[in-house]
Image (spheres, rainbow, N blue to C red):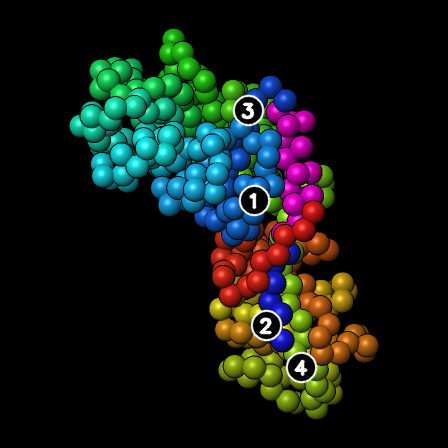
Amino acid sequence: MTRPARARINLTALQHNFNRIRETAPASQVMAIIKANAYGHGLITIARGLTQANAFGVASLDEAITLREAGYDRRIVLLEGPFAATELHLVSGYCLDVVIHCSEQVRMLEESHLRRPLNVWLKVDTGMHRLGFEGAEIAGMVQRLDASGCLGELRFMSHLACADDTADDYTRQQLEVFDDSLQVLTGERSLANSAAVLAWPDTHYDWVRPGIMLYGSSPLLGSTAADLDLQPVMTLESALISVRSYPQGARVGYGSDWVCPESMPVGIAAIGYGDGYPRHAPSGMPVLVNGRRAQIIGRVSMDMICIDLRGHPQTAVGDTVTLWGEGLPVEEVAEKAGTIAYELLCRVNHRVQFMSTG
Ligand SMILES: *Cc1c(COP(=O)(O)O)cnc(C)c1O
């Protein structure tokens, strides 16, 4: 028998979430963000499910080349642009678009002598203060890119820091800075991440760039995926590999963190931090056993977790344990583990068997 830890990837849910983006931002093209192995879901599986995306956004040349070699001829955007001048010939050869966010990258282009013009998304810093040019620098950068002789199409983008909080006025300020910085410049514009797709229609412009909502997790504080009509794409599961009863006072797991308060059944599921499940998940963390809620007890091990099976009298070895996904939102698990859904999803690793449906 193979180890039962598996991630079911539901492509029907992916299509549903994509349709939600289309409905919500009907006038915009969609750059589906599939960086970090499609937020841990599998780059190629997710690309295959996104037949209607107008472009793919990735973080590295590797990911872009993987997509090209798999036969995708769609627009692909390197969201952090080139990391070194030596990448530019591959970028050009594979017909990739690049974000350009700093003057060093402009220099790489100026010195590249590319034969084919490169499509550029110039990144404006509208207040996130991570990457991008300030408003006053933009005209000069556009001039340099023009003069380099290797500029193809030019677009403008920026990123929002607080769009997940619908009560935070900072998004409106960033929007104003974006418009002020670009005023007379022509070229398509892009600002919205998932949260902005859903909560800030004024940010939609020509291209929206949803990531997390594609995967069916809520990008908005205080709203669940169900509230927003999003469906989970990944369901992370394993199975019980042991069910035993222990007497009152028995200690369970590393560090003896859990002490049985009474005689009780304990199940062991084959999944742990070596698979990407968060090690700091505390006792009380919800899981589903055969679709019904139960709780983790004791410490998460590399390959296993322990589950309190009081109230689950019918369980047996081989029964399904769900860590998140259908029936148990990843956002809820993330919050209880002190992190965000993004991190949990992209940490699921190759030890887990991936299977796609729909
Ligand atoms: C990751 C990323 C996104 C997607 O953000 P979500 O919150 O997952 O929708 C959009 N734009 C850029 C530049 C990104 O790096």
| Magenta residue span | 9-25
**Residue picked out by circle 2:** 3
Measured Cα–Cα span from mark 1 to mark 4: 34 Å
Image vertical order of residue 141 relative to residue 236, above or below: above
Sequence-earlier tag: 1 or 4: 1
Three-letter residue code for mark 3: Gln
Residue at the location (36% across, 37% down)?
80
CB-based contact (under 8 Å), mark 1 and mark 2: no
Is residue 108 depicted above or below 309 in this figure? Answer: above
Tag 1 residue? 46
> SS class of the residue under badge 1?
helix
Identify residue type, mark 2: Arg
* Residue for badge 3: 29
Which amino acid is tagged 1?
Answer: Ile
Where residue 25 appears, x then y in whole percent? 61, 25
Task: Give the numbered dot on residue 242.
Answer: 4
